[in-house]
Image (cartoon, coloured by chain):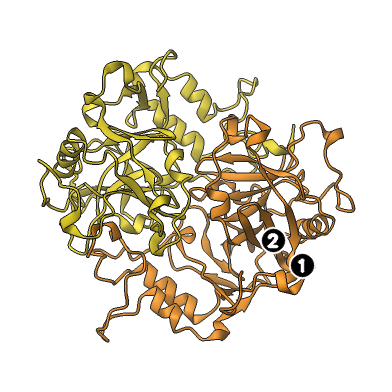
Chain colours: A yellow, B orange
Amino acid sequence: MFAATAFAQEPAAADAPAKPLSAQEILDASPDAHWRPLDPANTLYMELDSGRVVIELAPQFAPAHVGNIRTLAKEGFWDGLSIYRSQDNFVVQFGDPTEDEDERRSLGSAKAHLPAEFERPAAGLDFTVLPDADGWAPQVGFVDGFPAGRDPDAGIAWMAHCYGTLGAGRDMAADSSTGAELYVVTGQSPRQLDRNITVVGRVVDGIERLSVLSRGTGPLGFYEDPAQRTPIKAIRLASEVPEAERSHLEVLRTDSATFAAATEARRNRRDDWYKLPAGHIDLCNVPLPVREADTGDAG
Amino acid sequence: MFAATAFAQEPAAADAPAKPLSAQEILDASPDAHWRPLDPANTLYMELDSGRVVIELAPQFAPAHVGNIRTLAKEGFWDGLSIYRSQDNFVVQFGDPTEDEDERRSLGSAKAHLPAEFERPAAGLDFTVLPDADGWAPQVGFVDGFPAGRDPDAGIAWMAHCYGTLGAGRDMAADSSTGAELYVVTGQSPRQLDRNITVVGRVVDGIERLSVLSRGTGPLGFYEDPAQRTPIKAIRLASEVPEAERSHLEVLRTDSATFAAATEARRNRRDDWYKLPAGHIDLCNVPLPVREADTGDAG
């Protein structure tokens, strides 16, 4: 074996039948029923020169923001705008960077004011609890594929900031976001933002198109020269895109036995490379598997 | 205030004297004695076309590996080699990607075999404990600026995998690393690697030159086409570089009162933007401040 392959995340399958399955082997053996397609009405395609970023929206957590985002996408709000901020180990942010409010792009039919949607009642959510300790929340786990926190005593739940989380930028007032200015987490999970800002979804595919963007050299990673911004060709709801142009992705159901088994395999790595399995995993270290719905797809 | 400035990490200083100081205000008011220069004998400069990456080595944790790395740098081992792997949300890796061992670059005077240095006795280390819970280690904190874990019962300590951590790639055997193949963490802290691999230091400056590299499309993020690799012009010990060409950086001492106060300000964000301070911080979310030693420096 070659040193460059150092710490394989998914080592080759072992032949010895007594060994516990690796996460990859568990996924390979999973029944189709443990996967679900993305709902086109809750899926955004961000089209960049480098390709497509696929985002799943979370109306169960942020119905007002997701409603506005759907309207903005339908009306082409972001088309021709840009990613105007990339802060190392933190976020990229996009929308309209124009400072003068009077000169900013109109929100069209979207609402100019929305309530803050930082948290919601825990009741009514199918919350799959992760068995590990976390200093940021009384409980953490997954709701419909989204990393989330929960406070059983207070009866509330919220989406957590992990790599790929999509949130709605705001000003000082809690209710100052509209969904027009959005950020994606591209660094170490900034969980301090949990319950301080409205989270609206997460990147399901193509995040590397965002995470490799040159860091802005201005304060907070804003680009100092507008020419450094990354143009957004379009952001569309998948349901508004012709069927032939859609990405046909499936995500592993986080309420499935396959997800539970794959997560346990990650908590305790039993392949030969690991000498000391951690017996633990942090919420934002849990992989959220995605696959092509069929092999003929270009998604 | 403008929505694009959404969640300022360091908001402008407030005038109200009753307010607790922000982390930035604490740093701005810090005495010089709370900072230390990097030791040129323990500092590596990785020179890329995009500029310099500054690395601090940790001989207190990995003396044999750091000894080998010093030798390899002195003898120009990495000069003309490359970064040959970039796996999204995980690591970049560099060294000699040649698969045939007989054709790989000679280690020169460096040793071909080293002991595994996954952990060491806790005794003799100045360990500054972070007050927060962590599921990966009985205690976490900082030793000489390095994020670290500690098991007081077992009397051992180890370096933790955070963003910027530098480690020595290995094969299946625990003692198969030489320090010639190195990786830098560029994603969510992969703490499952703690105590499973030898950590040798961390990137102090210029990590964005690594974290923006295009992701390799081969398994584990290896580049499929050698032309995609990033050439390494040179890796040198700072002590071997003429004084005029050195970066003169200072890092905040993690055993200082300034570091303790700045970390506490991060644990409980009290600026107006934050509505609900977390009262918690994870080891790998704690900023490790760096500054230029003097303003005339190009560092």
Q: Residue at x 60, y 45 (%)?
A: B92
Q: CA distance from mark 1 to mark 2?
A: 9 Å
Q: In screen coordinates, is A281 left or right of B168? A: left
- The chain carrying label 2 is B
Task: Describe the element under mark 1 as helix, strand or loop.
Answer: loop
Between B109 and A296, the residue placed more toward the observer is A296
User: Residue placed at 49% from the left, 81% from the top?
Assistant: B257
Q: Which of the 4 quarters of the picture holds residue A221?
A: bottom left
Do pointers 1 and 2 mark residues of a single chain? yes
Residue A4: x and y in percent read 70, 38
Question: Residue at label 2?
Answer: B45
Residue A197 sits above or below residue B268 on the image:
above
Label 2 residue SS: strand
Which residue is at the far top? A296
Closer to us: B198 or B203: B203
Q: How many numbered badges does the structure rendering display?
A: 2
Residue plotted at (59% across, 47% down): B193
Q: Chain of mark 1?
A: B
Q: Mark 2 Cα within 10 Å, few/some/many (few <14, many 20+)?
A: many
Amino acid on which disc 1 is placed: Val
| Residue that numbered label 1 is attached to | B241
Label of residue B232 in the image: none
Q: Looking at the rendering, in which quadrant would you find the N terminus of chain B?
A: bottom left
Task: Find residue B273 and report its image quarter.
Answer: bottom left
The type of residue carrying mark 2 is: Tyr
Q: Is residue B207 above or below residue B107?
A: below
